[in-house]
Image: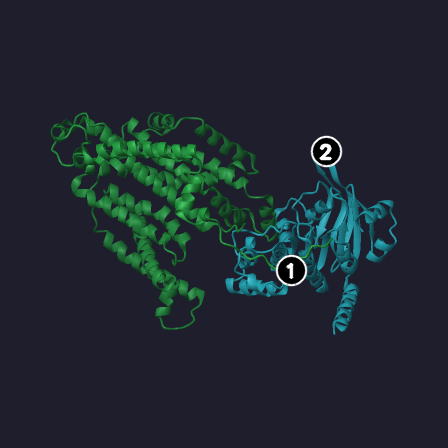
Chain colours: A green, B cyan
Amino acid sequence: MATIKTVATPAIAPPLSETSVLGWMRKNLFSSAFNTLLTFFTVYIIYISVKGLWVWGIADAVWVAENRRECFAINTDGACWAGIIAWLDNIFYGRYPREELWRINLGLFFLLMWMVPLWLPRVKAKISIGMTTVFLYPFLGGYLFAGSEKGIFMQIMLTTAIVCLLANTIHSIIGVFSGRSLPEFLSSLSGRKKVSDTTQRNIFLGLLALSFVVIYVWQMSWNLERVPWTKWGGLFLTLVIAGIGIASALPGGIILALGRRSRMPVIRVLSTAFIELFRSVPIITVLFMATTMFPLFMPQGFVLNKLVQVIIAVCLFNAAYMAETVRGGLQTIPKGQFEGAHTIGLGYWQTMGLIVMPQALKHMIPNIVGNFISLLKDTTLVSIIGLFDVLGMLRSISKDLPWLGLHKEPLVFGAILFFLICFTMSKYSRHLEAKLSTDHHN
Amino acid sequence: MTETKTQESEKTREQLVSAVSAEVIIEFIQVNKWYGDFHVLKDIALAVHKGERIVVCGPSGSGKSTLIRCINNLEEHHSGSIVVDGITLNRNLKNIDHIRTEVGMVFQNFNLFPHLTILENLTLGPIWTRKLPKADAHDLAMKYLERVKIPEQADKFPGQLSGGQQQRVAIARSLCMNPKIMLFDEPTSALDPEMIKEVLEVMIELADTGMTMIVVTHEMGFAQTVADRVILMDEGQIVEENEPGEFFNNPQHERTRLFLSQIL
């Protein structure tokens, strides 16, 4: 018998549990006597722990005191945050000369200025902004942080970096307000309506060259006092090591991963050997090797400072880890994508750069950010080989005479600090994932 | 009205059939290929003329996909030689690069680039390998999108399109490279029945323009209306090769009769 539906079934409202808070609570928290009991028990546990933390960390805590003895005199049950507050500068900047702190702050400000456009929606040419950050900022930051005489190479790179920063910033401001790029804006100033791509580029390059000359002459008069790396420390040092590590790990990892998949046997074997060697050794060993063995391989009289050695070690170690992450991502790309690229005539590097990497990197974002987070936390190990990073600084509070024996508070403070940084990174990675998603499989 | 139109297209097709030139554009000479121990192509000899439409059919595993994938070097053959557009396929990378830009290919699974919009999918090849200016590549892409009748989807991503639309985009992507030869590797096998027709229509229109086409397919209706020659492959060999009328109505080989009885 045939069934024919002649009247459409009308839609009715969803059940209460799908729409109201009370309905949700009844369904998820109090659905049975046992579940109700569990809910109350859990709430009680949360209450005790939060209350304990609240009393120790905030209600009974001492915020203003000269030394630890005074803290105890005011309240023995609470945390002695006064010690942390007194050491804040040390925690953030280490033993960097106090009258030169503006250099670190300015350097960080420049970094922010450089990177903020990457997050602004209407700005064009984000890839070149990102690339200049990675390749040119180190010269600007390096000069600000370390100071001393500049060689001719350093002067050129420094000037280039400043010109780039200026161009980026103006470009971004124009982009936010008008949605155009800097070259487009410049050629529109000339009043003509239609300007060809080449003239547009020539105007832009001409202005860049002009500002290069001006800034080059100007920067010759700059004179920053040298701050030796032994004075670097605290969160600043941690961020320097981790920052360089993060900026170099991804490109290094991509090169190693491609090397490991290469058809050329020598490249493949070398990449594989490098990756496996670094992955099978603990990072602390790598750090010790870098500071004690590395100088033995160098020519006589060639002395690298310990900080540079440590940074090289961190970069190599993380590049090896990143390589495996990248390789995992590359394997998620179906063979058909390579074949599709092949049939429209793309070569190896074009296929990798335009088709494979953009897709693979998108799949890898959670893992890459995971690597970055563990890299940041791993840098605390440098305190073992005598660099005073943020953890080293936090631990020396307890050895400072006025705050002798103050262990708990610095570590809690360090935990909060790391949590804030790492949680931000992880949140940002979630945001990136959502933003870059173009798979519309629903 | 429609009748006159079909008559017209019939006429043009006839003209084109006669326009199949004597010039050989693809030639297989005693080609052999193995996957490990498995002998997948056995002594293949085949000459394709310029403007010819060839349909290759056969059971799965018979080597028909491998055959056409050898033409643009997606698979390497082990002995014998393949000459495409006057160039012998060998390990010379320059030759391969040249051939790849002359031979377009459409796959069963479309192989569109999911992270790029439809328009970007189409302009990528012209911009990066043909070195066209962006504006020209854009115009070219829109021209071909109109030809496959989906210009309104230009700014969407492949994942937002139906299978039939994606396959038409894939055809347009190949055409943007202005190829001399088009290869189709089971272009309708991954599609819902409702969508097969729209893809076949685009392919028939393409055949009417005189493009050299080699199509691996099980769509026998397509073979009957469009093909100049139908080839049946089995166990790595070309078993029978004939013009469609003879192939379907008067098959010579026992294997062909069996194959046709199973799929028709």
- Label 2, secondary structure: give it: loop
The amino acid on which the numbered mark 2 sits, given as a three-letter code, is Asp
Q: Quadrant of residue B61?
A: top right
Q: Residue A6 carries which label?
A: 1
Residue for badge 2: B37
Q: Which residue shows up at 37% across the image and 69% down it?
A: A188
Q: How crowded is mark 1: few (under 14 residues within 10 Å), some or many (20 or more)?
A: few
The x and y percentages for residue A373 are 37, 37
The amino acid on which the numbered mark 1 sits, given as a three-letter code, is Thr
Q: Do labels 1 and 2 share a chain?
A: no
Q: Which residue shows up at 21% across the image and 40% down it?
A: A226
Chain for mark 2? B
Residue A176 in view in this figure: yes
Label 1 – label 2 distance at C-alpha = 62 Å
**Foreground: A147 or A384?**
A384
The x and y percentages for residue A343 are 62, 51
- Could you tell whether A106 is left or right of B39 in the image? left
Q: Residues within 10 Å of mark 2 (few under 14, many from 20)?
A: few
